[in-house]
Image: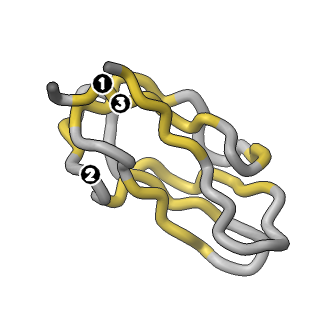
C-alpha cells in the first residue's frame, strides 16, 4: 500500500514550510518515525518523519520549494 508523507503543521501559526534537504533517497528503506526530511518552518528547522515503514518510492517536493501544510511531500510503499 502507498502512503503519503505530508507536511505536518508543527505549530498553530504554521501555514507553510520549505523543504531544506531529503535525508533519504528514492529506493531507500525507511522505518516508522525515522527522520526523512528537514523542513524550514516560520521560526525553526524541523524534521519530518516517516509515518510508516517501507520504501521511499517518490519525492514530490524538491529542496528549496515552499508548500502549504498538509501537502504531500513524498510517497512510501509500505511493508505488508
Locate the C terminus by quadrant.
top left
Front residue (pair 3, 42): 3
Q: Are marks 3 and 1 in contact (CB under 8 Å)?
A: yes
Residue shown at the point (83%, 59%) measured from the top left:
15
Residue furthest top in the image = 1
x, y percentage for residue 6? 57, 43
According to the picture, the residue beneath numbered tag 2 turns out to be: 32
Q: Residues within 10 Å of mark 1 (few under 14, many from 20)?
A: some
x, y percentage for residue 71? 68, 39
Q: For numbered disc 1, what is the local secondary structure?
A: strand
Q: Earlier in the sequence, mark 3 or mark 2?
A: 2
According to the picture, the residue beneath numbered tag 1 turns out to be: 77
| C-alpha separation, residue under disc 1 versus residue under disc 2 | 12 Å
Locate the N terminus by quadrant.
top left
Q: Residues within 10 Å of mark 3 (few under 14, many from 20)?
A: many
Q: Earlier in the sequence, mark 1 or mark 2?
A: 2
Identify whether 61 is placed above or below 21: above
Residue furthest front in the image = 80
x, y percentage for residue 70? 68, 45
According to the picture, the residue beneath numbered tag 3 turns out to be: 76
Amino acid at each position: 500500500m502507498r502512503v503519503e508523507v505530508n507536511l505536518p503543521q508543527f505549530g498553530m501559526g504554521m501555514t507553510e514550510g520549505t523543504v531544506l534537504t531529503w535525508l533519504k533517497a528514492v529506493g531507500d528503506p525507511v522505518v516508522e518515525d525515522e527522520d526523512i526530511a528537514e523542513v524550514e518552518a516560520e521560526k525553526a528547522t524541523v524534521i519530518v518523519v516517516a509515518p510508516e515503514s517501507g520504501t521511499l518510492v517518490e519525492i514530490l517536493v524538491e529542496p528549496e520549494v515552499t508548500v502549504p501544510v498538509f501537502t504531500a511531500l513524498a510517497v512510501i510503499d509500505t511493508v505488508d
